[in-house]
Image: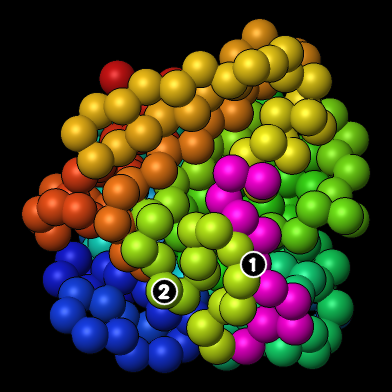
Amino acid sequence: MAGRRTSSVALGLALAGAAAACGGGGAAPPESAEAPAVARHTVEIDGAKRTYRLFIPPTVGDDRPLPLVLALHGSGNTADSFVQSSRLDVAASSGPFVVAYPEAVRLLWNGGFCCTSGRGDPAVDVRFLERVIADVAARRPVDQSRVYAIGVSAGGIMGYRLACDLAGRIAGVGAVAATMQLDDCRPARPVSVIALHGTGDDVVPYDGGRILGAAVRPAVPAMAVAERWAALNGCPGPAASTVDGLVTTTAWSGCAERSEVRLLTVAGGGHSWFTPDFGPPNGAVDATTAVTRFFGLTR
């Protein structure tokens, strides 16, 4: 979400301390006032114009296919606020990879059960994000086998929805402080998943239960989500578990089509995009580093 000092997310509600509110179409000319590497673009979905911010590392040539990351902000936040808190532009420059930051309608993604109280069709957001992928690819070469969705809170929930419904286009999902519903997920192929979740999350509870804000169904426990993806990806069990300070990593490997599943549990961690800036426990792991390294985007 929000800026570097307010990257915790709360599905549209303000939280104390560092927390903040969570959660080929027509091509508009780039708004070069921000930076040469940054542009804003517009696509049309069901007659509505929707926008995204695009970052292309300035040091790479125009003809080299690069991985693409869809960076999905939380409810009540914006693409620009997620730029600040995630620092994915910085990671993309060293990767290198391309980052598209789509904007949700009224700052709310519809992941199917959260976070719009069930209003509307989640397929509209799926079509929008699929269109963003195509629009980026029309502007510069994209490695279509390496398209990832990385999101926090409601953005992570939306990322899971993409993995379920758009597995033909999405190779992996990085979900921070998020959950998903299990019963309607039938991906067309294995999708690698890395999730980070704090046991002290009082917005999307780690152990499952009522989601703070607008949701028509309770959160599924973080471990159950990871286990479901391990099953969907045909991962052999049991999972391996390691502990490093406040962070417990549960990992499944040897899964179908070289997919992997990993859950990083942050003891005492809250509803946050984890970053060392916060100190323990929310600084016990760097979410950007963990996710981009998992997908081989950075070293």
Q: From what the image shows, is residue 65 above or below residue 46?
A: above
Residue named by callout 2: 202
Q: Which is the main secondary structure of the residues drawn in magenta?
A: loop
Query: Mark 2: which secondary structure?
Result: loop
CB-based contact (under 8 Å), mark 2 and mark 1:
no
Specify the quadrant that holds the C terminus: top left
Q: Quadrant of residue 294?
A: top left
Q: Position of residue 11 (x, y in %)?
A: 49, 81
Q: Which mark is residue 195?
A: none
Q: Crowding at label 1, few (<14), some or many (≥20) Cα neighbours within 10 Å?
A: many
Q: From what the image shows, is residue 260 above or below residue 34?
A: above
Q: Nearer the viewer, residue 159 or 124?
A: 159
Q: Position of residue 138 (x, y in %)?
A: 66, 45
- For the point 67% across and 60% down, the residue is 220
Magenta span includes 47:
no
* Label 2 vs 1, first from the N-terminus: 2
Mark 2 to mark 1 CA distance (whole Å): 11 Å
Q: Nearer the viewer, residue 298 or 291?
A: 291
- For the point 67% across and 25% down, the residue is 145
Q: Amino acid at mark 2?
A: Asp
Residue named by callout 1: 219
- For the point 50% across and 66% down, the residue is 205
Q: Nearer the viewer, residue 53 or 175?
A: 175
